[in-house]
Image: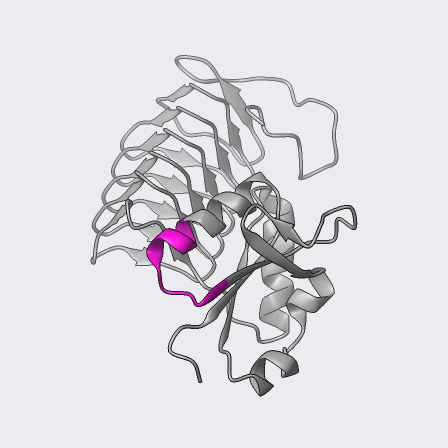
Amino acid sequence: MSAKPALWILGAGGHGRVVADAAAAAGRYGEIAFFDDDATLGPSVSRFPLRGDSQAFMDQSPAAKAAGVAVERHIGIGDNVRREHLALRCESLGLPLASVVHPAAVVSVEASVASGCFVAAGAVVAPGAELGVATIVNHGASVDHDGRLGRAVHVGPGAHLGGNVAVGDLAWIGLGAAVRHGARIGARAMVGAGAVVVADVENDARVVGNPARPMPASPGAPGNPRPLDA
């Protein structure tokens, strides 16, 4: 096998390009390639080749194995529900997901980062923190000590979680939000950009403001509303 594996990233949109850039900065991959179902994309996206669609991404890659290349996979999609769906599909196929951590991020050796996570430049993950499968801690965000984040959580750029914060599966913490020490954010909840959370947030709730308060749910697909700061 070659000294450096290849990284396959599913999703060539904005978030996927951020992941690819971080992976390139880390320097551990011999090749970084995109996979995407958008047929209008060209042979490459940014400086990275486009190798196929989602089905090709899920393939057991006999061609790659024949060439002596180890392949790691990452789902580079910002939307929590889509990312979780694809992560579950990979798990059902026995395809492990790689986590990507930008070299300019700070992740404590006492933190736990599950498979398929992304930690962006400037992010901090403190001692005792736990990131669930396919969770994102975006640019300049922080998860303080002993925070517990579920599966497919997205902590937006510049958002800060105090110590001992618990975040349920598929929750979205918006850009620049702040969550007080010990607060609980429910599964599938959305915290709006710049919100200041000083009390627990229920499952499926959408909260905005300072202090954060619930707002009526906007029309959209059940379980997958548009992020407040998208």
Q: Quadrant of the N terminus?
A: bottom left
Q: Quadrant of the C terminus?
A: top right
Q: Position of residue 18 (x, y in %)?
A: 48, 43
View extreme (right): residue: 39
Residue 74, placed above or below residue 203: below
Q: Position of residue 43 (x, y in %)?
A: 68, 55
View extreme (top): residue: 210
Q: Count of labels shown? A: 0
- What residue is rendered at 74% in x and 24% in y? 219
Q: Which residues are magenta?
A: 22-31
Residue 14, placed above or below residue 73: above
Front residue of this view, candidates 54 and 1 = 1
Front residue of this view, candidates 110 and 137 = 137
Q: Position of residue 211 (x, y in %)?
A: 39, 14
User: Does the magenta run of residues contain 30?
Assistant: yes
Please say whether residue 221 is visible from this viewpoint.
Answer: yes
User: Does the magenta run of residues contain 187?
Assistant: no
Front residue of this view, candidates 76 and 12 = 12
In this figure, which colouring scheme has been used for the structure?
Answer: one colour
Q: Is 147 situated left or right of 96 in this image?
A: left
Residue 123, placed above or below residue 92: above
Q: Position of residue 158 (x, y in %)?
A: 36, 29
Q: Is 48 situated left or right of 160 in this image?
A: right
- What residue is rendered at 65% in x and 55% in y? 85
Residue 207, placed above or below residue 24: above
Please say whether residue 135 is visible from this viewpoint.
Answer: no
Q: Quadrant of residue 209?
A: top left
- What residue is rendered at 58% in x and 69% in y? 91
